[in-house]
C-alpha cells in the first residue's frame, strides 16, 4: 500500500486525506487490465522548453478539470533552523503578485465556481484548482504568474504566521497523537531531515520571516523544478498549447541542484518513545520501520512491501486484525501500512490498541509474534492472491476519481518516480511472489531500524517491560 | 468496516486529521474539518448538467424505485441507499443503537460468520459499508462490473439476513466505547456534543448519534435485532445506482436485494424542534492550548421558499472557503484561526446553521466577538450586490465539480430523494438561484442570522465564562 501523503499539510482544512485514502492505495491506469481495456486513460507526458514537465490524464465523464502544480521541494529541503518554511511559503503563495494582487487569484477561482487548495509534505509542495474545463488556460496563466511573481509585505506575512501557528495548535499541540508522531519521526531519522515535522518545530515557526520565505521561493520555485498535472475533460494537444502559451513563458530563474540529503547511518539500536498526556483515553502502540521507498527500492521490493502491509495489516482479514482483534480478542484495533511515496526513505508501520484491561505490551507482543511468523514462514499462496486482487482492483476504483489520480501521479513524480512506474504499478503487483514478500519482511522488519511509540495516559501507568 | 476504518491507526490521527463523519460525501480538497453534519447538497448547484447527470427513474417489477446514472467509462458500479430513521429512532436510554446496527450489518450474514463474509468480500474486492447518522442508515456498495452478481448477493444478505452474533456485537460495542472514551477529551467532540445536547435538550436530536458511555453498554442484542427489523424497510428507502449497468439489470437487482424487506418501517414519530439556548454561551474547561468554538442558530427548512436565499447568505458568511466573510476577517486579516466556517444544516424535523473555529486560548474572546460581529453585520445590512452576484455565479458553476466521481453522484442522488426535491431538481436549480434578488437576500439574512446564537467553547479561554441560564 502506498501512501501519497508523507504527512502532507493542507492550506485549508480538507477532506483530501480521507477521501484519497482508498484511492491512494492504487493508481490507475492505462493498464488496470483487471477489467476492461476501455477504461484505460491515455496518460500523456511532455516537457516544455523551460524544463517544466506536464502530465495529462484524460477523463471525459464530467466537464471539469483538475489542474495541479507540484514543486519538487518540501520540508526535507529546508535549511536547518528554518523548519516550517516550505509550508509557510505555501500559505504565502496566496497573497498575490504584481499582476494579480492580493487575493485576486482566489477570487477568480471562486467566481468561476472553482475549488482550490494547497498542501506541503516532506518532498513536495502542491497547489491545485478544480474548475469547469473552459477555465483551464486561465488557471495556468495565474499559476505561471505566481511561480515567480509573488509579492510579500509584512502586513500580510504576520497574520499568516499566526494562521500557521493555529494550524500547528490544531494538528499537534492540541492532539496527543500528533505530538507522539513528531517524536517518533524525530527518533526514526538519526540524520535525515525527514525527522523534522513538515509544519516545523513550533519555536522555529515563530521566528520565520518574510525574507526567509522569499529566499526559499527564489531558490526553489522555477519551472525546471515543477511538474503540472492536468486531469479531466481535456486532450493532451490542447493542454500542450495552453501550457506553451502560459507556463513556457516563465524563464528559468534558478538551477536546481540534485536533491541529495544526508543519508541515515547504519541504525543499530531499537528506539522507543512514550508520550503521556492525561487526555489519552485509549492507549496505543505504533512502530515505524525505516524501509525503502518506491523510488529507492530495488525492482519489485516496494511492491512486495505493498503486499506485505496488506496481508499483515489491511482490513478485517489481515493477520493483525484477525489474530489480535477477533481471535485472541486482546485489541480493539490493529493494522499495518506501507508508505512508499518518498524521495528517500519509505516507512512500514504497525499499530494496535488494547482492549480495556489488557496491558499495552500484550498487544505489542502479539504484533511481534505475527511479524516473526511472517519472517519465518512467509505468507500463503492464498493470502498472496487475495492481496493482489484487492490491490489491483484498487487501481480500477482509482479511475473513478480524476482528482485522486492527479494527486497520485503528482506525488509519485515529485518523489522521483516516472509516469511509466506509476502506470505499470498493477503489473508490478502481479509479479510479486510469496518469496519476495517473505524476503522483504526478513530484510526490512528489523527492530534495530525502528521506533516504537507508546501513547499513554501517564508515565506512571506505563507498564514496565521486563 | 466503517467502524474499523474510523478506529484505524489511533496513534496516527495526524495523518488523517479529519476523521469525522459527514452525512453526505464532500468534494475532496474542500470543506472544513468540523464535527458538523454537512449535507452533500450544500455543495451542489446546477449550471449546465454534465453528461453524467442524465438521471433515469427505474422502477422494478416489485415496485422498488431507484435513480440511475449510467456511466460505462469505468468498469465499476456504485450503489448508495438510505433508510430514514437513524439515531432518532434509538430506543429510550439506548442511544447508539442505530450506530451499532450499522457497524454490524457487514459482519456475519446468512450462513457466513463475520470472518467468512469479510473474506468473501475481499476476494472480489467488493466494498460494502454502512453508517448511521441522526436520521438515516446509509449503505454503500462498490464493485467491479465483473463481480456485480456476487456483490448484489452480498448486499442482499447484509440487509436481509444479518446474524448479529454476540461476538461481533461485543467487539463492535467495545470499539464504539473506545471511540466514545477518546471523544471525552477531544475539544471538538466536546464542543459539538454540548452544542447539540443544549440546543435539543429532551429531543432525540440532543442525544449523541453514536451513543454515550452510559447508553451503549445497555444495548442488548435483541435491541439491535428489533431496530433492524423496524427500520430496514422498503417504505423509507431511497436508492441510487451509478456506473456501468443498465436499467434492466438494476430492476432485477432491486427486487432481488430489497424485495424481501418489510413494506413499511415502524418508526416512532419525531416532533419538530427548534434549537434552544440561543443567546447562551457555554464554556467547558479543558487543558489545551487552542480553544474550539462551536456556534449556531435556527436555520431555514429545505422546503421553505427562502431556503435558496439562506443558502446564498450562508455561503457569503462562511460557506465559501477563501471568499467568505468569516475567512477574511478571522483568518486572513487577523490570523486568529486556521479553520473557520459555517454551514446550513437541514434535518427532517429541524433546520440550523452551525459553524466552528479554533483559536489560541488568549485570543478566544476576540475571535468570538469577531464571529458574532460578522453575523450581526450580515443580519443587519445584508450582503452587497457584488457579494450576491459572486455567490450566485459560484454556486451555479461549481455544480459540475460535484459530479465527477460515481461516489459523489450516488451520494447526491440519494440526498435529492431524501430531500424530496424531484428528479428534475438539477435542471431547475440555476433558475432558483438566479431568482434570489438583493432585497430577498437582505430579508433572509435578517431572518436567518438575527435569531441569536448558542455558543460552546472548550479550552481554557482567557476572560471568557459561561453566560445565560445555568451552564457547565
Image: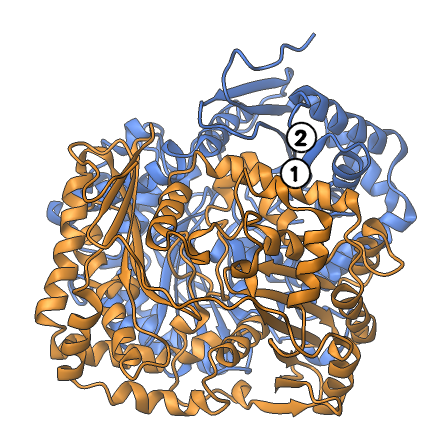
Chain colours: A blue, B orange
Relative to B371, say whether B271 is above or below.
below
- Same subunit, labels 2 and 1: the answer reads no
The residue closer to the viewer here, A279 or A170, is: A279
**Residue A234 pos. (x, y %):** 49, 81
Compared across the picture, whether A12 is left or right of A297 comes to left
Q: How far apart are marks 2 and 1 (CA)?
A: 8 Å
| 2 or 1: mark nearer the eye | 1
**Residue at 69% across, 62% down:** B228
Chain letter of the residue beneath label 1 in the structure image: B
The residue indicated by pointer 1 is B174
Classify mark 2: helix, strand or loop: loop
Relative to B6, say whether B129 is above or below.
below
The residue closer to the viewer here, B95 or A338, is: B95
**Residue B331 pos. (x, y %):** 22, 51
**Residue A415 pos. (x, y %):** 53, 49
The residue closer to the viewer here, A53 or A409, is: A409
| Proximity of marks 2 and 1: CB atoms separated by less than 8 Å | yes
**Residue B281 pos. (x, y %):** 22, 45
Residues packed near mark 1 inside 10 Å, few (<14), some (14 to 19) or many (20 plus): some
Residue A455: assigned label: none
Q: Is residue A105 visible?
A: yes
The residue indicated by pointer 2 is A355
Classify mark 1: helix, strand or loop: helix
Relative to B205, say whether B379 is above or below.
below
Chain letter of the residue beneath label 2 in the structure image: A
Residues packed near mark 2 inside 10 Å, few (<14), some (14 to 19) or many (20 plus): many
Q: Is residue B333 visible?
A: no
**Quadrant of the snapshot with the C terminus of chain A:** top right
Relative to B322, say whether B44 is above or below.
below
Compared across the picture, whether A96 is left or right of A363 comes to left
Amino acid at each position: 500500500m502506498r501512501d501519497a501523503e508523507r504527512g502532507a499539510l493542507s492550506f485549508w482544512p480538507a477532506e483530501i486525506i480521507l477521501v484519497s485514502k482508498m484511492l491512494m492505495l492504487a493508481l490507475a491506469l492505462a493498464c488496470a487490465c483487471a477489467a476492461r481495456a476501455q477504461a484505460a486513460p491515455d496518460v500523456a507526458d511532455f516537457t516544455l522548453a523551460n524544463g517544466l514537465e506536464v502530465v495529462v490524464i484524460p477523463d471525459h465523464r464530467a466537464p471539469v478539470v483538475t489542474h495541479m502544480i507540484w514543486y519538487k521541494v518540501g520540508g526535507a529541503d529546508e535549511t536547518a533552523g528554518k523548519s516550517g518554511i516550505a509550508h509557510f511559503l505555501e500559505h504565502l503563495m496566496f497573497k498575490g503578485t504584481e499582476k494579480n494582487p492580493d487575493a485576486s487569484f482566489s477570487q477568480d477561482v471562486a467566481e468561476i465556481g472553482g475549488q482550490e487548495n494547497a498542501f506541503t509534505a516532506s518532498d513536495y509542495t502542491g497547489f491545485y484548482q478544480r474548475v469547469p474545463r473552459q477555465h483551464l488556460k486561465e488557471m495556468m496563466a495565474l499559476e505561471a504568474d505566481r511561480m515567480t511573481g509573488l509579492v510579500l509585505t509584512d502586513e500580510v506575512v504576520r497574520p499568516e504566521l499566526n494562521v500557521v501557528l493555529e494550524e500547528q495548535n490544531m494538528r499537534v499541540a492540541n492532539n496527543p497523537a500528533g505530538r507522539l508522531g513528531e517524536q517518533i519521526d524525530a527518533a526514526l531519522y538519526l540524520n535525515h531531515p525527514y525527522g523534522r515535522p513538515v509544519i516545523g518545530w513550533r519555536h522555529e515557526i515563530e521566528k520565520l520571516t518574510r525574507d526567509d520565505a522569499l529566499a526559499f521561493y527564489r531558490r526553489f520555485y522555477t519551472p525546471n523544478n515543477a511538474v503540472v498535472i492536468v486531469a479531466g475533460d481535456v486532450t493532451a494537444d490542447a493542454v500542450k498549447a495552453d501550457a506553451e502559451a502560459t507556463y513556457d513563458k516563465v524563464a528559468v530563474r534558478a538551477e536546481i541542484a540534485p536533491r541529495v540529503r544526508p543519508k541515515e547511518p547504519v541504525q543499530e539500536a531499537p528506539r522507543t518513545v512514550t508520550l503521556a498526556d492525561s487526555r489519552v483515553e485509549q492507549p496505543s502502540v505504533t512502530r515505524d520501520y525505516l524501509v525503502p521507498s518506491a523510488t529507492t527500492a530495488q525492482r519489485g521490493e516496494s511492491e512486495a512491501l505493498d503486499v506485505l502491509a496488506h496481508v499483515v495489516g489491511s482490513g478485517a482479514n489481515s493477520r493483525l486484525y484477525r489474530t489480535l482483534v477477533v481471535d485472541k480478542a486482546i485489541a480493539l484495533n490493529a493494522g499495518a501500512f506501507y508508505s512508499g511515496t518518498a524521495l528517500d526513505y519509505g516507512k512500514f508501520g504497525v499499530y494496535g490498541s488494547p482492549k480495556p484491561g489488557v496491558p499495552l505490551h500484550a498487544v505489542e507482543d502479539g504484533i511481534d509474534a505475527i511479524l516473526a511468523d511472517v519472517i519465518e514462514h512467509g505468507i500463503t499462496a492464498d493470502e498472496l492472491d487475495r492481496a493482489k486482487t484487492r490491490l489491483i482492483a484498487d487501481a480500477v476504483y482509482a479511475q473513478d476519481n480524476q482528482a485522486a489520480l492527479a494527486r497520485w501521479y503528482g506525488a509519485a513524480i515529485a518523489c522521483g518516480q516516472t509516469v511509466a512506474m506509476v502506470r505499470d504499478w498493477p503489473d508490478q503487483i502481479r509479479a510479486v511472489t510469496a518469496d519476495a514478500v517473505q524476503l522483504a519482511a526478513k530484510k526490512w522488519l528489523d527492530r534495530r531500524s525502528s521506533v516504537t511509540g507508546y501513547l499513554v495516559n501517564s508515565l506512571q501507568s506505563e507498564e514496565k517491560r521486563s | 468496516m466503517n467502524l474499523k476504518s474510523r478506529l484505524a491507526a489511533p496513534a496516527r490521527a495526524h495523518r488523517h486529521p479529519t476523521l469525522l463523519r459527514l452525512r453526505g460525501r464532500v468534494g475532496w480538497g474542500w470543506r472544513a474539518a468540523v464535527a458538523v453534519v454537512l449535507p452533500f447538497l450544500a455543495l451542489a448547484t446546477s449550471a449546465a448538467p454534465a453528461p453524467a447527470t442524465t438521471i433515469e427513474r427505474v422502477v422494478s417489477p416489485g415496485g422498488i424505485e431507484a435513480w440511475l446514472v449510467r456511466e460505462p467509462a469505468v468498469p465499476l458500479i456504485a450503489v448508495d441507499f438510505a433508510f430514514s430513521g437513524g439515531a432518532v429512532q434509538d430506543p429510550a436510554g439506548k442511544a447508539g443503537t442505530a450506530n451499532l446496527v450499522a457497524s454490524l450489518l457487514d459482519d456475519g450474514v446468512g450462513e457466513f460468520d463475520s470472518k467468512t463474509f469479510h473474506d468473501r468480500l475481499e476476494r472480489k474486492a467488493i466494498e460494502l459499508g454502512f453508517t448511521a447518522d441522526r436520521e438515516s442508515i446509509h449503505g454503500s456498495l462498490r464493485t467491479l462490473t465483473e463481480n456485480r452478481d456476487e456483490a448484489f448477493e452480498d448486499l442482499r444478505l447484509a440487509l436481509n439476513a444479518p446474524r448479529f452474533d454476540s461476538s461481533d456485537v461485543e467487539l463492535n460495542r467495545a470499539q464504539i466505547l473506545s471511540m466514545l472514551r477518546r471523544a471525552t477529551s477531544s475539544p471538538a467532540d466536546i464542543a459539538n456534543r454540548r452544542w447539540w445536547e443544549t440546543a435539543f435538550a429532551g429531543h432525540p436530536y440532543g442525544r449523541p448519534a453514536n451513543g454515550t458511555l452510559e447508553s451503549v453498554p445497555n444495548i442488548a442484542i435483541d435491541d439491535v435485532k428489533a431496530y433492524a427489523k423496524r427500520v430496514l424497510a422498503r417504505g423509507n428507502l431511497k436508492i441510487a445506482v451509478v456506473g456501468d449497468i443498465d436499467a434492466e439489470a438494476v430492476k432485477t437487482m432491486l427486487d432481488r436485494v430489497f424485495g424481501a424487506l418489510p413494506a413499511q418501517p415502524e418508526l416512532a414519530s419525531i416532533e419538530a424542534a427548534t434549537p434552544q439556548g440561543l443567546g447562551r454561551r457555554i464554556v467547558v474547561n479543558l487543558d489545551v492550548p487552542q480553544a474550539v468554538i462551536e456556534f449556531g442558530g435556527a436555520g431555514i427548512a429545505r422546503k421553505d421558499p427562502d431556503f435558496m436565499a439562506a443558502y446564498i447568505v450562508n455561503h457569503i458568511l462562511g460557506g465559501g472557503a477563501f471568499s467568505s466573510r468569516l475567512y477574511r476577517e478571522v483568518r486572513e486579516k487577523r490570523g486568529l484561526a486556521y479553520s473557520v466556517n459555517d454551514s446550513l444544516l437541514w434535518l427532517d424535523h429541524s433546520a440550523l446553521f452551525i459553524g466552528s473555529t479554533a483559536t489560541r486560548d488568549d485570543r478566544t474572546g476576540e475571535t468570538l466577538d469577531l464571529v458574532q460581529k460578522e453575523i450581526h453585520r450580515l443580519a443587519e445590512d445584508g450582503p452587497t450586490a457584488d457579494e450576491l452576484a459572486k455567490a450566485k455565479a459560484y454556486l451555479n458553476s461549481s455544480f459540475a465539480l460535484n459530479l465527477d466521481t460515481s461516489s459523489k453522484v450516488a451520494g447526491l442522488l440519494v440526498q435529492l430523494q431524501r430531500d424530496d426535491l424531484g428528479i428534475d431538481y438539477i435542471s431547475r436549480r440555476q433558475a432558483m438561484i438566479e431568482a434570489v434578488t438583493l432585497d430577498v437576500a437582505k430579508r433572509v439574512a435578517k431572518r436567518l442570522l438575527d435569531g441569536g446564537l448558542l455558543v460552546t467553547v472548550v479550552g481554557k479561554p482567557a476572560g471568557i465564562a459561561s453566560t445565560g441560564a445555568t451552564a457547565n
